[in-house]
Image: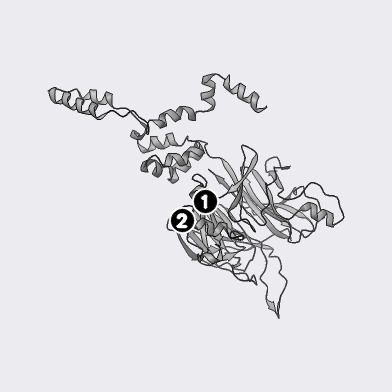
Amino acid sequence: MAFSEFHIAETQMPIMEKRRRNPSRKFCRFMKSCCWSKFQSPQHYLKRKENRDEDPDPDPEEDIEEQEPNISSLPDDLLMECLARLSRSSIHPSMLVSHRFCKVLKSPSYYELRRIVGRLESLLFVFGGAGTGLKSAVYCKSNGGWGAGLLFNTDSIQGNEWYLDYHSADNSLLYAQSAILNQQIFILAAIPCPISGNGDCTIVYDAWTMSLTRRAPMLCPRKKFACCVISNRIYVAGGALINDSTRAAIVDAEEYIPELDVWKPIANMPRKRYGCLGAAVNGIFYVIGGLKFGNMNGLSMQPYAYVGSMDSFDPKTNTWLKTKALPNGGCVIACTVVGSCIYMLSSHAVELSFWKYVTDTDSWTRIKKPPIPSPLRMDNVLKFNCVTMGSLVYIIQVGGSIDDLLRRSGRNARGLKEGLVLIYDTKLQEWQRGPDLPYVQNGAACAVVEC
C-alpha cells in the first residue's frame, strides 16, 4: 500500500479502532496529568483557608473532591504497570519527569515487566571494526530495514568530551566484543585515541537513553577473546594481550559484576585459545574453537593450528568442565545460541559448514549450510558474525567481498558483494536473504538488544 493510500485509510478509520490499535494514546492523557495538571492560583488557596476558618464544622470530603488525581499518586506497582506500556521513544523523556519516574524506569523489575507485557522489541546493532570510530548500523526487525548513524547524540558531546577520544580513533573498537544486559550493550576492550592519555575501558551503550558511559576496564586488556553473560554477570576468557604483536594466546579468565563496576579473576582455562568464541547455555560458559598459540622460531612465528575442541565453565563452582571435541574439523568462525542449542558456522578453507550442538543431549547435527558459493577460498578475507533474534539466526558478513573472490577464481559475480545478511529459520530449517548492511565495517561486532 502506498503512503498516501495508507494515510487516507488511517484518517477514515473509526476512532475506537484507532484506539484499539494504538493503546498508548489513551495512556498519553493519563501521563500528562503528572506534569500538566491544573494548578490553582494562590488567591484560590487563601480563600479556601478563610472559608475553612469561618466554618466551625468543615467537610473533609470537600478537600478530597477538589484534589485532582494524577499518575504520581499511584503506588509504585501500579505506576510501573502504567509506564510499562510506554513506547520505547517515550522512556527517556519520561525519566526526566521526576526522580521517582527515573528510579522506576531504570529498575530491573521495569525491564522484566515490559518483557511480560510484550513491549520489548529486538534491535540489531553493528558497530566497531577498522576505521569506524563509534559509527553504527541498526536493524529493526519490525521495519525490516537498516539505519546508519553514531552510538551517541552529537548534542550530548558537551560535558562528555571523552566520546571524541574513541570516535576519533580509527581502531577504537577494532577488537571490541559485546555483552548484553537488559537494554544495555557492554562494549569490552574499547581503546581510545593514543594522544588522549586515557586507557582502555568498558563502554556501556543504553538503547533507551541512547547514551554512553564508561566503566572499569578488564584486568587483563585483551583481544580476540570469548565472552558471554550469565545471571547478569559478564565472563571473558582467552585471547591475547591487546598490545602483543605475537598474538600469543593466554588462559586468563575474568568475571564482571555490573552493580559494583568490578572485574575479578576466575579459574584459568585448561588450554590457550586465540580468536575463540563464547556462548552461554543453562548457566554454562562455552569457549569454542580458536587457534593454538605459536612459538617464536628465529624471527618468524610458527603457523597457527585450529583448536578442534570446546571448553566449558561452571560459574557456581568456579571450575572448568571436561573438554569436548568439535566434530567438524574446521575453524569455528561464528556462533550463536537459540534455546539450549549452539549454532556454529565453520570454515573449511574453501567452503562453509553449519552445525547445531544440543547441549541437553550433547549431540551434534550438520544442517543446511548458508547459500554461499563453493568452492571459495576463504582465507582470512571473509569475516562473519552470528546473532539470534527469536528463532532466527542472522549471519552477517562484516568483512571481504564474495564477488571479488569469485572473480579471482575465474567465475562470474553473483551479486554477493559486501555486507551480506543471511537468515536461517531454525523452525522451518530454511535460509533466506535479508537486507544488506548499509556499509561494511571490517571486523565489526554485532549485538541484539531487547529494548
Identify the residue at image location x=69%, y=57%: 333
Distance between mark 2 and mark 1 Cα atoms: 13 Å
SS for callout 2: loop
Do tag 2 and tag 1 residues touch (Cβ < 8 Å)? no
Tally of marks: 2
Q: Going by the image, does 339 lie left or right of 114?
A: right
Q: Which mark is residue 221?
A: none
Q: Nearer the viewer, mark 2 or mark 1?
A: 1
How far across and how far down the image is residue 230, in percent?
52, 54
Residue 284 figure quarter: bottom right
Instruction: Please give left or right for residue 343 compared with residue 369 in the image.
Output: left
Q: Is residue 203 visible?
A: yes
Q: Is residue 103 above or below residue 251?
A: above
Residue 397 x, y percent position in the rendering? 70, 51
Instruction: Report the amino acid beneath label 2.
Output: Pro
Give the labeled residue for mark 1: 205
Q: Nearer the viewer, residue 435 or 110?
A: 435
Residue 432 higher or lower than 52, as above or below: below
Q: Residue at x 80, y 54 (%)?
A: 404
Where does label 2 land, which residue? 258
